[in-house]
Image: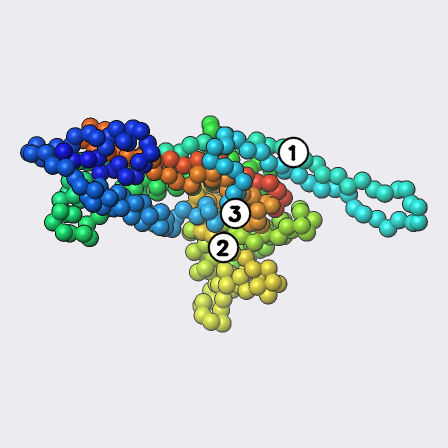
Amino acid sequence: MAMNPFAALAPSNPRVQEMCDAVVRCDGETERRADANETFMVSTALQAAGIDAVQYIYPDLMFRQFAPLDTQVGPGADSYTWQEYDITGMAVVVANYGDDLPDVSAYVKTNTGYCKSLGDSFSYTTQDLRRVIEARQQGRMGLVLDVERIALAREMIERKKDVICATGDATSNLPGMLNNANVTLLTASSPATGSSKSWTGGDKIGTEMLKDLRTGLSTVYTQSKGRHYASVIGMSIDYAMKLAMTPLVPGAITTGTQPTVLETFIASQSAMERPIKIIAWNRMATADAAGTGNRVMFLQSTPDVLKLIEPLPFQAQSPQANNLRWKVPCESRFGGILIKRPLALAYMDFV
């Protein structure tokens, strides 16, 4: 009789221990017992697959680059609170024994966010496990369980987080960062010739695109009274490519002496000692008020401005027997993105 090869993954689990004693038949023939080395080898294969899966990179999932991770919310939390506030008042020069000291106040709004579980699963059939055990018995040590299934399970959870971080999930009360009602909404300038405000619409020239970028930056700086300065700009992939390929001077050939809009913008920010990071995110292409067009986001990406709430990034649970396969439930705990200082952000739409 062969022992459950998954047993070593969670030896303290009574249910798993019970499954360890279960009988598994190999191809309907005589029963064989998998020795401790076989059990350990399959467990190691699963662990290796999990490690490889966590190392996968999903280039189109960019939400983690905008907001620092909050480490204060634990996996067991069902909710969390944060404050949005604005400070008023100013110190003054006072005469000796002066009694006219001004009040310094902080207008605080307390918000409550919620943490929800995200889940999916992957599975291996009993035949998959037999192949691994058979390879071990024949000395083929290099054969391990493939990482594609666990990697796919993790990717699907990451993609759900990507959607939530963009526009939130109203049903589950999970906030996103592209549609916060307290963030200033700008409208891009009209072109000198034509009517399309879009950077890819064909009417705007390089200098007009550069004007829109600088308008977004100045808005964050002025509305926060100099407290915040945008360090990150999020935009769609096609908008980022347009800035990178459009010459600042109409009709100019982009060579070393004819910079593009993006090169000019980056260089001017560096000269001011205000470096800027451009993040191309596919979610921005349909993030405007109508949900059908481009939105550009300007923000200061620091922990006092916004945070990513992720109490439990990803966890594969103990395998469970399900007919002729072993099902591995996967979960994560997620709370979306909270924005603490809306004045440190600005949106720009193009309609």
Residue 229 is left or right of residue 76, and the answer is right
Residue appearing at x 33%, y 48% in the figure: 51
Q: Is residue 137 above or below residue 5?
A: below
Residues 305 and 254: in front is: 305
Residue appearing at x 11%, y 49% in the figure: 138
The residue tagged with tag 1: helix, strand or loop? strand
Quadrant in the picture for the N terminus: top left
Q: Is residue 349 above or below residue 108?
A: below
The residue tagged with tag 3: helix, strand or loop? loop
Spot the residue most to the bottom: 257
* Percent of width and height locating residue 106: 72, 39
Q: Which residue is mark 1?
A: 109
- Separation of residues labelled 3 and 2 (CA atoms): 16 Å
- Separation of residues labelled 1 and 2 (CA atoms): 31 Å
Residues 93 and 60: in front is: 93
Quarter residue 157 falls in? top left
* Percent of width and height locating residue 101: 85, 43
Amino acid at dot 1 = Lys
- Separation of residues labelled 1 and 3 (CA atoms): 21 Å
Q: Which residue is mark 3?
A: 68
Count residues near mark 2 (Cα–Cα under 10 Å), then give few for <14, some for 14-19, many for 20+: some
Spot the residue most to the left: 29
Q: Is residue 4 visible?
A: yes
Q: Nearer the viewer, mark 3 or mark 2?
A: 3
Q: Which residue is mark 2?
A: 278
Q: Nearer the viewer, mark 1 or mark 3?
A: 3
* Percent of width and height locating residue 112: 57, 31
Marks 1 & 3, CB-CB < 8 Å contact:
no
Q: Earlier in the sequence, mark 3 or mark 2?
A: 3
Quarter residue 244 falls in? bottom left
Residue appearing at x 42%, y 51% in the figure: 237
